[in-house]
Image (cartoon, helix red, strand yellow):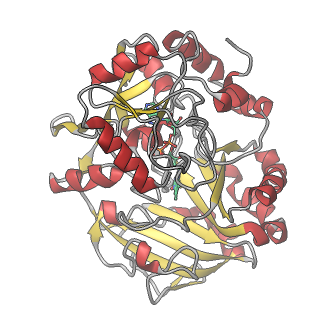
């Protein structure tokens, strides 16, 4: 089932007054994720329109998962029994300008939230490379953008409403029940159904985006901190084929001080003379405006524009977080195996993310740099390549992105998440029978633990 059919079926379901089963697909195509590399294990998909419908549905299930916008590359969202879609629960509940927060229903995407916020004079602090994803799915997996002072997208959450396995509505907030809140925000879909989120907002701001080409690796080695601090958000794109970074994307706030004055050369890289795609051969039509053209935050922070296919489309993705203080060493380690990566790679992106306090965030108490791989959709080859990359990064105790592909064994994962025991206890409290667990969570996190 392609994306258009999926959305059509969801809309059809919510026109009925009761929860409507969508098992009888008219299409013979299977329900898949965005990239098409994961075929979900069931096509039983229910769409809810209200909190009461969510509660009613949850109480009847013994095993289920919420399906967001299906942008994960692994099976974290998979279910063998039932899916629940909150796509139609996508309203802005309240914009509180005094408290500087917005409360939303969790089916909302950033693509719809951001123009609304901007029209009211507000903004969120950061966005991922694409706006197409649901806020709830993004926060559940610690999705991030870039910027050394910017936490991942989940760090904007100040309140969360969850329907637990008993069908009870639990409200947690940064102020009132801080410990459970810190455990629940990056909840990996394991605690229940997130029905509402409250996000911090700030006054809307304008940005300019500049791209530079061919930054020598020697400059990166010497001036990594200077490069990362040059703009609000910095992305480094490389194919590892030469000792250089192919493209440096600098996203500058126009209220940034000191202002980025966009010199012709940036640490040896040359200012691009036209808009570029991170994969230079692809058309920049899908990309957000560059060349220093001023524009609103939500049309500069993502790389890809709403209404266009983000990234390359037919691809696989993997991404590893390493401690910021190991960034240069880790980049050089991957550069050394560039020849092995090259044949399978479309592009790598390197980003910086601030530390946070969310238990299952890869940036828990640790500022990080991420090394991301957009790979050709050839799983047999990629499945052999990932352990090679992971071996090179092993000295830096890498944490994989929860929504992307990896082969790091569970024992290693457990050793880098110091709050995992507390998260397991929280999961047991919210979901004693494991209704929201699936094969991915059992294999990577919960193991045989009941
Ligand atoms: C082209 C592309 C570009 C990307 N760029 C970035 C990037 O720049 N940065 C980055 O960090 N990641 C990026 N990603 C990864 C992606 O954004 C995340 O993995 C994110 O989880 C996607 O959200 P989703 O709603 O599509 O998740 P889904 O795959 O639908 O679900 C993810 C998890 O969230 C859970 N979930 C979703 N909604 C709820 C809910 N309401 N209640 C409880 N659990 C819920 C699901 O059960 C599942 O466990 C990219 C992915 C693609 C395809």
Q: Determine whether, in the image, residue 213 is placed left or right of residue 68.
A: right
Q: Determine whether, in the image, residue 114 is placed left or right of residue 151.
A: left
Please, is residue 450 above or below residue 135 in the view?
A: above
Residue at x 61% of width, y 61% of height: 350
Q: Position of residue 388 (x, y in %)?
A: 84, 54
The answer to whether residue 104 is visible is no
Q: Position of residue 357 (x, y in %)?
A: 51, 31
Q: Position of residue 315 (x, y in %)?
A: 62, 62
Number of labelled discs? 0
Residue at x 62% of width, y 47% of height: 38
**Which of the 4 image quadrants contains residue 246?**
bottom right
- Please tell me which residue lies in front, 106 or 371: 106
- Please tell me which residue lies in front, 108 or 177: 108
Q: Determine whether, in the image, residue 197 is placed left or right of residue 377.
A: left
Please, is residue 193 above or below residue 35 in the view?
A: above
Q: Position of residue 235 (x, y in %)?
A: 54, 65
Residue at x 68% of width, y 48% of height: 405
- Please tell me which residue lies in front, 260 or 345: 345
Please, is residue 221 above or below residue 49 in the view?
A: below
Q: Determine whether, in the image, residue 372 is placed left or right of residue 265.
A: right
């Amino acid at each position: 089932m392609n994306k258009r059919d999926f959305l059509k079926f969801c809309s059809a379901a919510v026109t009925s007054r009761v929860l409507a089963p969508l098992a009888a697909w008219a299409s013979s195509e299977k329900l898949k994720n965005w990239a098409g590399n994961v075929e979900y294990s069931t096509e039983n998909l229910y769409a809810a329109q209200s909190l009461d419908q969510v509660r009613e549905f949850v109480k009847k299930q013994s095993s289920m998962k919420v399906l967001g916008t299906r942008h994960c590359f692994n099976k974290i969202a998979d279910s063998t029994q039932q899916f629940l879609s909150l796509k139609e629960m996508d309203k802005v509940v309240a914009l509180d300008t005094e408290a500087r927060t917005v409360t939303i229903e969790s089916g909302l995407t950033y693509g719809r939230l951001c123009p609304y916020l901007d029209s009211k004079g507000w903004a969120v602090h950061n966005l991922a490379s694409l706006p197409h994803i649901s806020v709830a799915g993004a926060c559940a997996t610690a999705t991030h953008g870039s910027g050394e002072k910017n936490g991942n997208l989940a760090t904007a959450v100040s309140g969360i409403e969850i329907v637990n396995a008993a069908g009870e509505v639990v409200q947690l907030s940064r102020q009132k029940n801080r410990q459970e809140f810190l455990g629940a925000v990056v909840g990996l879909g394991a605690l229940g159904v997130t029905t509402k989120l409250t996000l911090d907002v700030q006054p809307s701001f304008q940005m300019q985006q500049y791209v530079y080409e061919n930054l020598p690796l020697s400059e990166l080695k010497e001036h990594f901190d200077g490069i990362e601090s040059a703009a609000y958000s910095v992305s480094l794109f490389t194919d590892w084929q030469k000792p250089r970074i192919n493209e440096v994307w600098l996203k500058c706030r126009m209220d940034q001080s000191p202002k980025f004055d966009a010199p012709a050369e940036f640490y040896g890289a040359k200012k691009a003379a036209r808009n570029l795609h991170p994969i230079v051969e692809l058309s920049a039509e899908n990309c957000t405006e560059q060349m220093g053209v001023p524009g609103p935050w939500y049309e500069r922070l993502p790389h890809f524009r709403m209404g266009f296919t983000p990234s390359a489309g037919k691809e696989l993705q993997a991404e590893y977080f390493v401690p910021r203080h190991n960034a240069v060493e880790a980049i050089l380690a991957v550069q050394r195996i560039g020849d092995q990566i090259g044949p399978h790679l479309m592009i790598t992106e390197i980003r910086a993310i601030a530390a946070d306090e969310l238990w299952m965030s890869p940036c828990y108490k640790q500022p990080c740099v991420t090394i991301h791989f957009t790979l050709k959709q050839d799983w047999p080859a990629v499945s052999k390549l990932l352990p090679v990359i992971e071996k090179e990064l092993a000295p830096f105790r890498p944490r994989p992105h929860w929504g992307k592909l990896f082969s790091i064994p569970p024992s290693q994962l457990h050793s880098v998440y110091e709050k995992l025991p507390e998260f397991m206890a929280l999961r047991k409290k919210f979901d004693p029978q494991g209704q929201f667990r699936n094969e991915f969570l059992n294999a990577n996190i919960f193991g045989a633990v009941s």
